[in-house]
Amino acid sequence: MKRAGVFLILLFLATAQPSDTGQTSQDTAGTGTELVQNCRRYFEFLGRTGAGREEAIERGPFGMGYCAGLLHGVVEMVETLMPDRFCRPPQATAAQAVWVVVQYLENNPLALPENDTELVLRALENTYRCP
């Protein structure tokens, strides 16, 4: 059953169009350029409470959802199908994973034009190396 869920997530990510994910143009869809902005907003959202959360979500709900879904999809896919690619600690939170991606993208600006899924995987691999 878990594999079916992972398959559906991957199928969604593979077939998502820019209009489905809140992207504003074909030029930046699926790259680190848009992802870093969306994940920054999502990280900010995760750190807020009460009215602050509403304010954060009003600024880009689709982009934040895209970031959350992409990270979740990559983590689930790797942990299910490629468990030796990275070793995320069991206590790692969603906010920490988002921050890992944001930091990687900000520290590697030349990689921003690359595919966002590959960048998420690379960020997680660099941070959560297996022993």
Image (spheres, grey):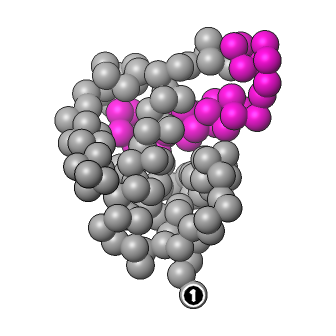
Q: Residue at x 65, y 52 (%)?
A: 93
For the question of whether residue 7 can be seen, the reply is: no
Q: Residue at x 41, y 21 (%)?
A: 22
SS majority, magenta: helix
Range shown magenta: 28-55
Q: Would residue 37 be found to the left or right of residue 48 on screen?
A: left
Question: What x and y, as percent, mark residue 101?
Answer: 57, 52
Q: Is residue 85 left or right of residue 5?
A: right
Q: Residues within 10 Å of mark 1 (few under 14, many from 20)?
A: few
| Element assignment for label 1 | loop
| 100 in magenta | no
Does the magenta segment cover residue 42?
yes
Q: Nearer the viewer, residue 60 or 82?
A: 82
Who is closer to the viewer here, 122 or 13?
A: 13
Which residue shows up at 20% across the image and 35% down it?
15
Residue 21, x across and y down, in percent? 37, 26
Residue 88 appearing in the image: yes
- In screen coordinates, is 105 left or right of 49? left
- Number of dots carrying numbers: 1
Picture quadrant where residue 57 is located? top right
Identified at 55% across, 19% down, the residue is 60
Q: Quadrant of residue 31?
A: top left
Q: Which residue is mark 1?
A: 131
Q: Amino acid at mark 1?
A: Pro
User: Front-most of 116 and 80?
Assistant: 80
Q: Quadrant of residue 48?
A: top right
Q: Quick check: 20 above or below 101? A: above
Q: Residue furthest front?
A: 1
Quarter of the image where the C terminus is located: bottom right
Q: Residue furthest bottom?
A: 131
Front residue of this view, candidates 2 and 52 = 2
Looking at the image, residue 94 sits to the left or right of residue 18; the answer is right
